[in-house]
Amino acid sequence: MSVASDDILTRPLGAKRTPRERLRSLNATYLTPRMVTGGLVLGLVGGLSILGAVGDPQGGEPVAVATIALRDPPPVPTAAVPVPEKPVAAQRSADAVETASGVTVVRAGGGNAPSDAVVIRVPDAAPVKLASAPDPRLVERGRHGSVPRLGEGRIRPLDVYARPDPGTTGPRIAILVSGLGIGQAATASAITRLPPEVSFAFAPYGGDLERTVARAREAGHEALLQAPMEPFDYPDSDPGPQTLLTAARPPENLDRLAWAMSRFQGFVGIVNYMGAKLTSDAAAFEPVLREIAARGLGYVDDGTSPRSIATTLGAKAKVPLARAEFVLDALPRPEAIDRELARAEAQARAKGFVLVSATAMPMTIDRIARWSKDLEARGVRLVPVSVALRAASGSARLSSAAP
């Protein structure tokens, strides 16, 4: 390679260079490798700057714009869809109505409806409310506390504290669940799980009975009082303190009954708690029934003793009286309870009305709760026990054709 100093030494003074010689001299003087590299870097930076300023989100990829035209949806056919008239369709329609509105649907065969009908029973706007207790007109102070009494104009606690019943026709079942107020778990389960038409009998030994009974009545359950009565194997089987005894004088038994009646207020009647021996002894039992009648209450025999003469003495003592036809959980097995519930339903259809009793065992509460869910759909209605008591006193009738 030649440099500028070569020209000075070899070219005569004053002689001019040709264009090619000038270019070669320029390259040799300025275009060194470092300068070439710098130029490339400057070009790259400039290109990136231009790209950032202009912006190319597609990274140089080809872009095409297409117009999408919206079309109207195809018309819906207007042909009528046939509705099958099979019972299955009615069943599905009934389920849909229940789900959407919360009403009760009585399916085919319910009550007096035609076999292919779907009858809708709209529930009341508000739940049934029982009268507040105690009613000042129906209470008096006794030796053990407040006890019920017959009010002015012969107003009875049986009528005032009873759960209102619409009195519609059709098969009816009254269920009395006894033994409540002692076990808190069983009592709470019965109050929340059983239909409000089921009546409750409370033993006088539970704690905080006033509040427990008030909670049950607020839920719509009618209340009765269990009075402890002497069984045949007493005292091996002991109902508890203040038991009414066949050997006791009538005033003593009535005092013990007053103690039990002072435990809470708002009950419509008395139920035997054990008592197979007392309820079979006319001399000891009749004064008790007369006292119950004088206070405007009713008496319910729970059906556990075949020797009871309560039905025979009831008319003589002039007390509203009803007896359970059988006990649902006499055999405490789920299948046996279900069988007795089916028996009660069959008797209600045949006779128009049936009264049965049960104990507050968790198993019994569960079986009654399951069985009663669709009872009205099968054309049978639950009613409170007071329906039977008031019918016995002439203020109601139990015939399935009664108004």
Image (cartoon, grey):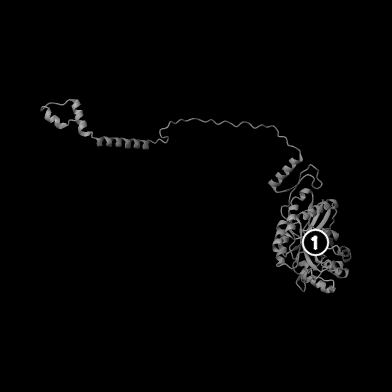
Q: Position of residue 130 (x, y in %)?
A: 74, 60
Q: Is residue 403 visible?
A: no
Where does the image place residue 372, in percent across and percent down from the top left?
75, 53
Percent coordinates x, y for residue 339 in the rendering:
79, 53
**Residue 316: which quarter of the image?**
bottom right
In this view, 217 is above or below 65: below
- Residue at 16% across, 26% down: 17
Image quadrant where residue 156 sits = bottom right
Provide the secondary structure element on which disc 1 rests. Answer: helix
In front here: 378 or 117?
Answer: 378
The three-letter code of the residue at mark 1 reads Asp
In the foreground, 37 or 45: 37
5 or 154: nearer the viewer: 5
Please say if 202 is above or below 251: above
Q: Measured along the vertical axis of the image, is residue 35 above or below residue 221? A: above
Q: Which residue is mark 1?
A: 159
Q: What residue appears at the point 12 percent right and 28 percent down from the top-left corner?
A: 10
The residue that appears at 27% across and 36% down in the rendered structure is: 37
Please rate how many residues cluster around mark 1, counting C-alpha atoms within 10 Å: few if below 14, some from 14 to 19, many from 20: some
Q: Examine the rendering and report whether any part of residue 7 can be seen.
A: yes
Count of number-bearing discs: 1
Question: Which quarter shows the N terminus?
Answer: top left
Residue 208: horizontal and vertical position, in percent? 70, 67
Which residue is the extreme one toward the left?
A: 13
